[in-house]
Amino acid sequence: MVDDREWSAVGEQVRQVRLSMGMSQNELARAVGLDRTMLAKVEAGTRRLDAFELLKLSSALGVSMDYLIEPKPEVLSRRSAQITEDSDSQVARSSQRLEIALTEWLRELRQLISHGVLRSRPVLRYPGAVASEAQAREAALWVRQQLGLGDGPIDSVVEVCERAGQFILVTDVPGDGASLVDGDVAAAVVSTTGDPGRRRATAAHELGHLVIGDEYSSDLGVHASRADREAAIDAFAAELLLPVSVLGGQQEVPGGLTRDRLVEVAARYRVSWSLALRQAVRSRLIDTATRAAWSQSRPTHAEFMEALGWAPQPDLFSVRVPPSYAHAVMEAWRGGWITRVRAVELMHGQIAESDLPESGELEIEP
């Protein structure tokens, strides 16, 4: 399964996952029933593991056995920073957990593609140059035009990303999000730690990395700092979710843009209050002093729901995987390529095993 030259790589994978979880060698050794010195040898690559030990390690670390024994995708290997005991921090751990989730998600996509039940999507690439926030906003409006979204609210960011060629997974890991393009597959993960508005902004942010590129895939902002590149991607995400032109229409409303009207727009477009305020300033309907004042009185959940007429807004709350992926999982299960347990695993909490029928079609809520 693993030759002698690769055991050091397996050991390093074990160490990286352990550090990302904030576990000591003693804690992991106790969890898998090994002596700490034996675990140290495993991480150093000088002690081999049998299949049962690998299974116990993967279970204790919350990753698949494949993650421990298979090399990372090349695109992740180029950009990943290794955690060491000296560089260990919460930020480093969160980044590593996101990359682990992204690697596992890519493998799941590849598995379904290999069974012929899922197809990769053509990637939507912006044809113009993007070197500023203004150009990033133009790119967002271009995406809306290409996908026929007009200037209305986006019902499902996951579906929009899928149509643009990116498969998004919403998963329980710390941090915000991460994405990659590996050959013909574009994948992204979004953390559940934020509220739904923040999740939508993160998903749109990762789509921005795909559509206009980043330092790993294009020459976007090659003369700019990482902060400037991320600011451009943030501008893309904000404009995609809530075009400034929508707020500009408030100028025709007597009294201009009031806080109540902005709450209503934020609720209808399902964006965070901070993003709504940012777009309102950009539209020049409020000044920075008003933004500061309104940011101190964040709308309550009741205010948002009142603005929507108490209609539920489930995007990125109950939905965890893209529609075509969900149907591919069910097709793979019905075709006998995966077990019921594996089908539930691949759905990442969107369904339980009791939701699977004994026969017939499974209805998947959008």
Image: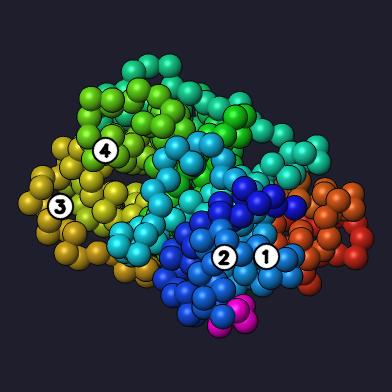
The type of residue carrying mark 4 is: Arg
Point 56% across, 73% down: residue: 38
Please tell me how crowded label 1 is: few (under 14), some (14-19), or many (20+) other residues with Cα within 10 Å.
some
Q: Single out the mark in the foreground, 1 or 3.
A: 1
x then y, percent, for residue 270: 41, 52
Residue annotated with mark 1:
49
The type of residue carrying mark 2 is: Val
**CA–CA distance between discs 1 and 4?**
40 Å
x then y, percent, for residue 125: 48, 23
Q: Which residues are magenta?
A: 30-34
Secondary structure at numbered mark 1 = loop
Instruction: Identify which residue, 354 or 39, lies in the foreground.
Output: 39
Magenta stretch: dominant secondary structure: helix
The type of residue carrying mark 3 is: Arg
The type of residue carrying mark 1 is: Leu
**CA–CA distance between discs 2 and 1?**
8 Å
Residue annotated with mark 3:
291
Tell me whether circle 2 and circle 1 mark residues in contact (CB < 8 Å).
yes
Point 22% across, 34% down: residue: 225
Looking at this rendering, what residue extends furthest in the left direction? Answer: 289
**CA–CA distance between discs 3 and 4?**
26 Å
Q: Earlier in the sequence, mark 1 or mark 3?
A: 1
Is residue 366 shown left or right of residue 312? right
Instruction: Identify which residue, 256 or 351, lies in the foreground.
Output: 351
The reply to whether residue 204 is in sight is no
Instruction: Identify which residue, 200 or 58, lies in the foreground.
Output: 58
Residue annotated with mark 4:
226
Please tell me how crowded label 4 is: few (under 14), some (14-19), or many (20+) other residues with Cα within 10 Å.
few
Q: Earlier in the sequence, mark 3 or mark 2?
A: 2
Q: Is 264 located above or below residue 22 in the figure?
A: above
Residue annotated with mark 2:
42
